[in-house]
Amino acid sequence: MFFLEKYFFVNNFEPDLIKCQDKNTIIIYRNYCKIDNIKEIINLKNFCKKNYFKLILANNIKLALKLGINGAYLPSFNQKYNHLSYSLKKDFILLGSAHNFKEIGIKKKQRVKRLFLSSIFKENENYLGLNKFKNYINTSEDKFVALGGITNNNVKKIKLTKAVGFAGISFFKKKAPKKGPLNI
């Protein structure tokens, strides 16, 4: 049976939301709105380690290495190559996102192991659709992850492509426990 890798983007440390995820889900901490809160990242790292989740830190390879986090995620706007001079551990995971062939080329030069390509279902300025998404990933031997508008209804369509997984936010938040009194 073919299983898709799952990547959950979080903007802050929400233990209840993370704990209710499948143990094979990889957590990507990305918070572009504020300066890295080291204490929050360390708490998240310790929580993930205790609960057997892999943790990836967005846009800060140096900090990910310093804190012993499982890997780093380079968003499409990060087009730097300075991390290529770093000594990365063998099991350090390097991920990156792209929206077009030019950005795919940059991510290849950055040596990412998984390339997040968006948007497969969400109709925004980066919208590809299923067919264009398949065309992009069929031209490469790289490992692609679908991103954008993933739902329970369309996740099966990803299996029709060569994608190795999918990533998102809202798909995973739907698994969160409801707060408040129980409705019986």
Image (cartoon, grey):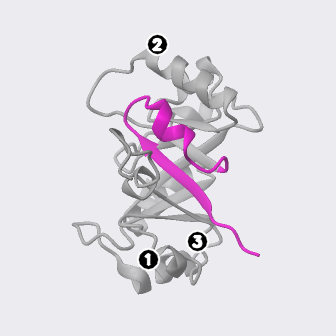
Quote the CA–CA distance across marks 3 and 1: 17 Å
Closer-to-camera residue (54/80): 54
Q: Is residue 21 magenta?
A: yes
Tell me which numbered mark, 3 or 1, is placed earlier along the sequence: 1
Is label 2 or label 3 in front? 2
Q: CA distance from mark 2 to mark 1?
A: 37 Å
Q: Where is 12 relative to 156, above or below?
A: above
- Amino acid type, callout 1: Asn
**Residue 163, numbered circle:** 3
Query: Mark 2 highlights which residue?
Result: 39
The residue carrying pointer 2 sits among few (fewer than 14), some (14 to 19) or many (20 or more) residues within 10 Å by Cα, namely few
Q: Which tag, 2 or 3, sits closer to the chain's start?
A: 2
Task: State which quadrant residue 87 falls in.
Answer: top right
Tell me the magenta residue range: 1-24
Q: Secondary structure at mark 2?
A: helix
User: Whole-percent x and y of residue 110?
Assistant: 54, 47
**In the rendered structure, which amino acid carries the disc numbered 2?**
Lys
User: Which of 166 and 181 lies nearest the eye of the viewer?
Assistant: 181
Q: Which residue is mark 1?
A: 153
Instruction: Report whether 70 appears left or right of 102.
Output: right
- Tell which of 20 and 1 is nearer to you: 20
Figure quadrant of the N terminus: bottom right
- Which residue, as the protein is rendered here, is positioned at the far front? 184
| Residue placed most toward the observer, 6 or 112 | 6
Horizontal and vertical percent for residue 67?
Answer: 60, 19
Q: Please, what secondary structure does the residue beneath circle 1 have?
A: loop
Nearer to us: label 3 or label 1: 1
What residue is at 31 percent from the left and 34 percent from the top?
A: 32
- Callout 1 crowding tier (Cα within 10 Å): few <14, some 14–19, many ≥20: few
